Amino acid sequence: MTTPSRMPEPYGQGSSANLADILERVLDKGIVIAGDIKINLLDIELLTIKLRLVVASVDKAKEMGIDWWESDPALSSRARRDELTRENAELRERLARLEELETGRAEKKEAP
Amino acid sequence: MTGLRYVYAVCRPFGTPLQSQLKGVAGDPPRGLTHHGLVAVVSHVPERDFAEEPLHRHLEDLDWLTETARAHQGVIDALTTVTTPLPLRLGTVFRDDSGVRTMLEAREEDFRRTLDRLEGRVEWGVKVYAESEPKKAAQPAQKAASGRDYLRQRRAQTRSHEEMWQKAESFSTHLHEQLSAFAEDARLHPPQNPALSKATGRNVLNAAYLVPRAHSEEFVELVDRTKGELPGMRIELTGPWAAYSFAGEAT
């Protein structure tokens, strides 16, 4: 077998590859074979690791000023739309009330 | 011969030697163990780190895991330049060479089938990020003069936010369709964790594409052309990877 004559340049790989790219492949993908040393990444350990990473990421993200999930807890587009629809309705209502008040005030002013 | 055997990948015999300075997960250089016409790429690892109890402990240690994952990927990456490896999941460890041979025999048929399916293919990772806040709409330009102004501004913000997510969604969907049509196979992965990726913005697409090596250049160009198509979207391409996402059972 020969080395392919022309390989595209690697993009963002090697030491610069992001840790998430590497971990999601070497831990979650690849062929699963039961070796002599029993590890069950899919159950306990991986869960622990994932939980820790989530905790770590929340702190880190807050440090970086990213907190969009706080207003978007379900992290789904549907929840996002529902939330926006609700907020929109609420704001419209408030706007309508304000406009009513203002109209009322203006009418009072006009009336002698 | 002491120590345990850490297995990185299974492949067909390859002529080109691996780089001589290549180091495995515990510093020992990986070598090929040939059996029944298949090669298991193996290195020796010490019992004190890779026996059951210490391994369990280490897996909970993110620094150890990071280092080990990078070394594992380093070996797979080196193999990818000379052959088509089937990457095994991190932490596949046997007591001795005969344990590795037994495993090769037991899975022989699977390995051959998967090797045939993936021969000459590589994996490309494509991620799309949307900036988490549209820059201008994040703060009102000036203080709202009245309640009505405030509401108007707030409504405009909400609308632009909503529009941005809709755009990000349809952009990602369209890109994924386009790339899937070109690739032989595709997988969608969950969005990435910002703490690990150190990436800014929100990861709206995280996908892997199986592409014949010979068509890789075209694939890269296809991805490059979409960059800058929509402001506020960032596209990241990684690869070529070994076909990690496609090494499991065919769907």
Image (spheres, coloured by chain):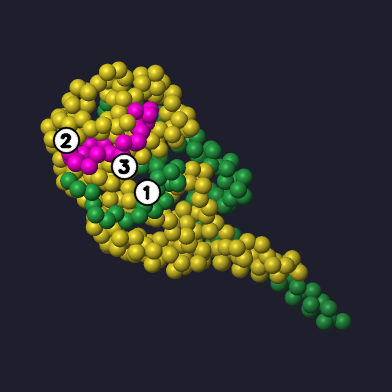
Specify the farthest residue to the front. B20
Image side of residue B6 versus residue A20, left or right: left
Q: Is residue B216 left or right of residue B116?
A: right
The chain whose colour is green is: A
Q: How would you rate the neighbour count of disc 3 (Cα within 10 Å): few for under 14, some for 14-19, many for 20 or more?
A: some
Residue wearing tag 3? B78
Q: Secondary structure at mark 3?
A: helix
Examine the rendered structure and indicate whether residue A69 appears above or below residue B232: above
Which chain is disc 2 placed on?
Answer: B
Q: Nearer the viewer, mark 3 or mark 2?
A: 3
Q: Quadrant of residue A25?
A: top left
Q: Earlier in the sequence, mark 3 or mark 2?
A: 2
Task: Write the residue at 60% across / 45% down.
Answer: A62
Residue B216: quarter of image? bottom left
Say what amino acid the circle numbered 3 marks: Ala
- The residue type indicated by label 1 comes to His
Chain holding disc 1: B
Q: Colour of chain B?
A: yellow
Name the residue that disc number 2 marks: B38
- Which of discs 2 and 1 lies nearer the camera? The answer is 2
In the image, what residue occupies the spot 72% across and 67% down? B142
Q: Quadrant of the N terminus of chain B?
A: top left
